[in-house]
Amino acid sequence: MKFRFVEKLNARNKDANASEMPVIAFLGDSVTQGCFCKNDTNESYVTKFRYLLGRLYPAVPAYVLNAGIGGNNTEVALSRIERDVLRYHPDLVVVNLGLNDIWGGETSATVYAKTLGEIFDTIKNAGAEVIYMTPNTINYYRSGATEPHNMEVALLTADFMTSGHFDGVIEAGRAEARKRNIPICDCTKKWKNFERAGVDTTLFLSGGINHPYPDMHWLFATTLIETLFDLNAD
């Protein structure tokens, strides 16, 4: 798939005076914002993506907007999408949500899919392109990195993983994206591939629950580059 955003990058790179500034926005939760054991937006995958984009198009200072807020689920993100994203007229919006939607019990997948679909439609109706970025997996067990005040939470989130609840929610999101022919930047799949190879991905989490260490944010950034430039195409 060819993205208009990439076409604008190319045009701007050739002649900065002849084309508009490309704008990409990221709508997400704490992972997008850049939350680890302490917050550091300079270590987020959004910042790492901006760096990679600058290496590919050194003459293009593309506007990269980080609209990630810790604790957001799809419903909260939808409520602020106009204020935090669409008012800036982005060419492309990357949506990375789900880690906070898994707490809705048996209706988690249904509500997630419905609201995510509304987010997709709202963005497309505003004239922007959309990419659905699936989140990292969370902890499978209570690890030594789990903070004392999160011990009980870690047991609940581990159950979300081992019971298949997390997988069901994210697959519902993929289905909504497929309905609309929205490209999927499948970071969840990358984490799952590590797990199938015997890697303990719980050790990738700085708080022992759901926040990847800064180095793992490169996976999000590089996977988005692969999706954006269709690097996995035949």
Image (cartoon, grey):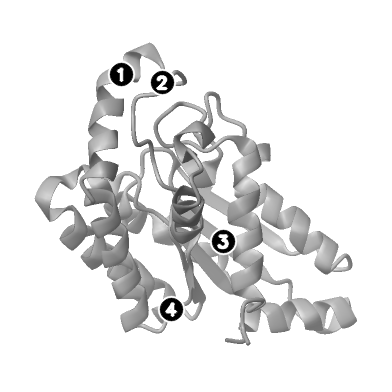
Q: Earlier in the sequence, mark 4 or mark 3?
A: 3
Q: Is residue 117 left or right of residue 207?
A: left
Disc 4 to disc 2, C-alpha distance: 36 Å
Q: Earlier in the sequence, mark 3 or mark 2?
A: 3
* In contact (CB < 8 Å): disc 1 and disc 2: yes
- The x and y percentages for residue 212 are 52, 38
Q: Residue at x 36, y 44 (%)?
A: 72
Considering the numbered disc 2 on the image, is that residue within a helix, a strand or a loop?
loop
Q: Earlier in the sequence, mark 1 or mark 3?
A: 3
Tell which tag, 1 or 3, sits nearer the viewer. 1
| Quarter the C terminus occupies | bottom right
Tell which tag, 3 or 2, sits nearer the viewer. 2
Q: Residues within 10 Å of mark 4 (few under 14, many from 20)?
A: some
- The x and y percentages for residue 85 are 49, 60
**Quadrant of the image occupied by residue 189:** bottom left
Disc 3 to disc 2, C-alpha distance: 31 Å
